[in-house]
Amino acid sequence: MKTVTFTEFRKSASSLISDVESGEVVVILRHGRPVAEILPYDTGEAREPSWKMPGLKLAVKGAGLSRAILKEREAS
């Protein structure tokens, strides 16, 4: 694992990215505290983006809300 300051990262980003490509982990410090960790990309498992996954469907048994509202309006 390699630790660099934010300023060092800006100056030598290309070489640090090359290090990451070869398996190195880079931690970026800002004001002495870690703010980011750059890891090599894991190509072992192809993941589907979350926006392509099916969404949750919520269902409630009984009358639909819109029907209940229409009945209430008709009764008034």
Image (cartoon, rainbow, N blue to C red):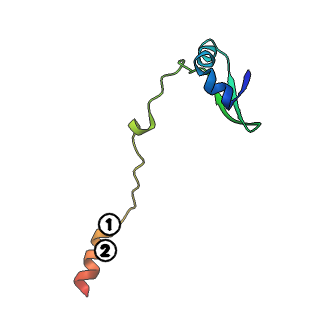
- Marker disc for residue 68: 2
Viewer-proximal residue, 70 or 46? 46
- Quadrant where the image shows the C terminus: bottom left
Query: Quarter-wise, where is residue 40 in the image?
Result: top right
Numbered disc 1: secondary structure:
loop
Q: Amino acid at mark 1?
A: Gly
Q: Which residue is mark 1?
A: 64
Q: Residue at x 38, y 62 (%)?
A: 61
Viewer-proximal residue, 56 or 25? 25
- Residue that lies at the very extreme toward the left in this rendered image: 74
Q: Are marks 1 and 2 in contact (CB under 8 Å)?
A: yes
Q: Residues within 10 Å of mark 1 (few under 14, many from 20)?
A: few
- Residue that lies at the very extreme toward the top in this rendered image: 22
Count of numbered badges drawn on the protein: 2
Query: Quarter-wise, where is residue 18 in the image?
Result: top right
Q: Residues within 10 Å of mark 2 (few under 14, many from 20)?
A: few
